[in-house]
Image: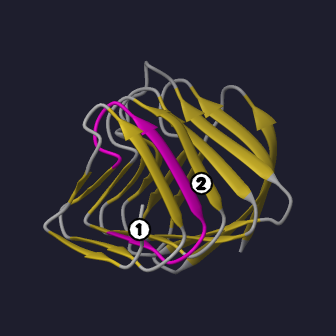
Amino acid sequence: EYNILGSTQDGSLTLSSEQAVRLIISNLTLTNPAGAAFNMSGDMTSTVFLSPGTTNTLSDGTASTENATFLAEKGLIFTGTGSLNVTGLKKHAIASGTTIAIQSGTITIPAAASDGFNSNQFTLEDGTVSIQSSGDGIDANGTVTINGGFLTINSTSNDVKSQSMEEKLNW
């Protein structure tokens, strides 16, 4: 378990692990002009806990060498009641090589040069998600599942792209 807080305009968090990781973020502002703000690698699922009452902000830069501001080789789970704002100036805002699941919290993508979310699977269980992107709001190679919560997408492509869709939410 890692508690992440503070502010920097030129930094990043890179973590490699073969075990499940839990990140607790509390009033974090992290910008990496040359790469991903968060880069998670290894055969693990990362759980990101958004601390109650906090606003957390991640951004990359146009000179980034990575595909996303928040990049994970394996799964990402977002939970907690705080807020997370992720800006993807180079390409995607949040990308995972496998799955992205939002269990709770408020996730806002005020800008993404390509996709807001990019993964193989995407699930929204609860929470509020708002996406402003130049590409797809959500791009999943597999299934997009929406069981609850609130989803708003404003994008040039203005769509959700996946192989199959299970929707239980009007949006």
Q: Quadrant of residue 128?
A: bottom right
147 or 100: nearer the viewer: 147
Residue 64 lies left or right of residue 33; in this view the side is: left
Q: Residue at x 13, y 67 (%)?
A: 163
Q: Which residue is mark 2?
A: 107
Q: Residue at x 58, y 47 (%)?
A: 108
Percent coordinates x, y for residue 71 in the rendering: 43, 51
Whether residues under marks 2 and 1 lie with C-beta atoms below 8 angstroms apart, the answer is no
Check the image and report above or below for 63 versus 118. above
The figure's colour scheme reads secondary structure
User: Which residue in the rendered view is the most extreme toward the left?
Assistant: 163
Residue extent of the magenta highlight: 122-137
Residue 136 sits inside the magenta stretch: yes
3 or 18: nearer the viewer: 3
Label 2 and label 1: CA atoms lie apart by 18 Å
Mark 1: secondary structure: loop
154 or 31: nearer the viewer: 154
Check the image and report above or below for 101 versus 114. below
Residue 92 in sight here? no
Percent coordinates x, y for residue 1 in the rendering: 71, 74
Q: Which residue is mark 1?
A: 170
